Image (spheres, rainbow, N blue to C red):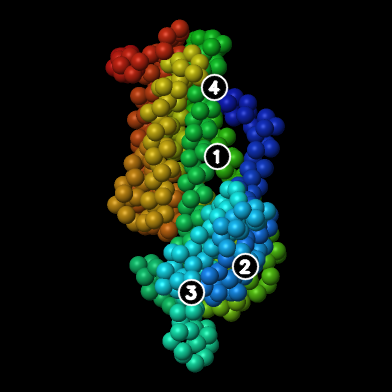
Amino acid sequence: MSNVSIIIGREFNERVRKKSFIITTLLMPVLMLALMVAPALIMQFSGGDEKRIAVIDESGRIAPLLTDDDELRFETTDLPADAARKVLTDRFAILCIGGDILDNPSNVKLYVNGSSSLTVESNIEKQIEKIIEEEKLRSYDIENLQQILDDVKTSVTVQTFRNDKSQEEDSQAQSSLVAMGLGYILGFVLYMFLLIYGAMVMQSVIEEKNSRVLEVMVSSVRPFDLMLGKILGVASVAVVQILVWGILVVGVGGVVLPHLMPEEVMAGAQAMQQGIPDAAASVDMNPEVMQAVAAITDLGYVVKIFACLVLFLLGGYLLYSAMFAAVGSAVDNVQDAQQLQLPITIPVILALLMMLAVIKDPNSQLAFWFSLVPFTSPVVMMARIPYDIPMWEILLSLALLYATFIGMVWLAAKIYRVGIFMYGKKPTFKELAKWIRYKY
C-alpha cells in the first residue's frame, strides 16, 4: 500500500498543480451557467432584420387585423397577385389571402423573394388562425363576446406533493420542471467526467509505456499496484474538482443568492420549503420559478445532491478508468486505442440517451433497470435522483456499481500486466481474452 500511495500522490500532484486544472476548476461553473443561459440569450437577440410583407387580401377581412411586430411588417396592396410578384421584388414576401378564407383556411399563399424561415411562416399562420377564429365567433352574434372570452380564460397551476413521503399538509411541493433540469445537468456532468477522466488515465498509460518508464517502475512495484495507484490518483483529482464546485454552488445558493434575491422572493422560497402551498401566489411569481429558488437555497437538498454526485462519479470513474487503463496498456498510440475503446464508450453514450427516457418517466421499468446496470447507472441514476426516488434504489445501485468495479479491476489487471510489455502490434479482442485467462 505504501507503493500505491506514492503513485497516487504523484498522479494527484502532477495534475492539480497545473494552471489548466486551477483555471478549469474555477471557470467550469461559470461556463456551465453560461451554457444554460446562452440559449435564452441567443433566442432573445437572434431576431432577424425587419421583413416587409405585401398583403393581398381578396376577402378584405384578414389584412386589417394583421399586427406588426419586431420582425414582420405587413403592408396591404391593391395590385393583383401576378403583378405584385413582378413589381414588389423589394419586399420580403407577398402574402395572398383568398376570398373564401373563412370557409377554406388553406387558401393562403406566401411568395418569398429569397429564403423563408419557420418562425416567419409560423407567425403568419398563427395570426391568420386567430383572426379566423374570432371572425367565426362574431358570426354567432353573442353580446359582450370578448369580455366573456376574457372571463373564461383560466390558467391552472398544479402543485405536486409526495403522498408516499408525507401525508402532512405542510409537506414541501415537488417541481418536475426543476427535477428535469437538474437531472439533465447532473447526468451530462457524469457523462463528461467518465469520458474525460477515463481517457486521461488511458493517455497517461500510453505515454509512460512509449517512454519505457513502466519497465523501470515494475521492477519495484507490482503492475496491479501501479494500475490501481494511477486510477485512484486521477480519481482524487476528479473528487477534488467536484468538491470545489460543490462548495461554490452551496456558497452561491446558500449565502450569496439570498442577498441578491428580493426579500419577498426569499420569504416565499422559505415558506415553500416549509410546505406553505400559496407561497408563490403571495409574491405574484410563477410557482415553478419559486420552487427552483426554494430548491437552490435549500442547503440540505443541495448537500444530498452533491453527496450522491461524488459517490456515483467516483464509482463510475473507477469502473471505466480500469477499462481505459487496460486499453492503454494494450496499445502503443491513441489511434490504435480507438477500436478497443469503442465497447467502453458505447454504454456511456447509451446512458446519455437513456436520460431522455428518465426525463419522460423517471419511474419507468426502462429507467429503473438502466439505473441499476453498473455500466449505465452513474449517468442514469444521477438523472433520476432529483425526482426523489426511494433511497434503497440509490444504495442498491451504488452497491452494484462498486462491486462491479472490484471485478473489473481484477480483469483489467490481467490485461494490464501483459499489455505494458507488448510493443509493435495492436492486439485483437481474442488476444485480450487470452491474456485474461493467463495464470500467474
Closest to the observer, 202 or 104: 104
Residue 96 pos. (x, y %): 54, 63
Residue 149 in the figure: left or right of residue 356: right
Kindly identify which numbered label has been placed on residue 204: 4
Residue 379 x, y percent position in the rendering: 43, 44
Label 1 to label 4, Cα distance in Å? Answer: 18 Å
- Give the residue type that dot 2 points to: Asp
Tell me the kind of residue under disc 1: Val
Kind of residue at badge 4:
Ser
In terms of sequence position, does the residue under pointer 1 or pointer 2 come before the other?
A: 2
Q: Residue furthest bottom?
A: 143
Amino acid beneath label 3: Ile
**Which sits earlier in the primary sequence, circle 3 or circle 1?**
3
Gap between marks 2 and 4 measured at Cα? 74 Å
Tag of residue 78: 2
Between the residue at mark 1 and the residue at mark 2, the CA separation in whole angstroms equals 71 Å
Residue at the (35%, 15%) spot, across then down: 428
Secondary structure beneath label 1: helix
Residue named by callout 3: 132
Quadrant in the picture for the C terminus: top left
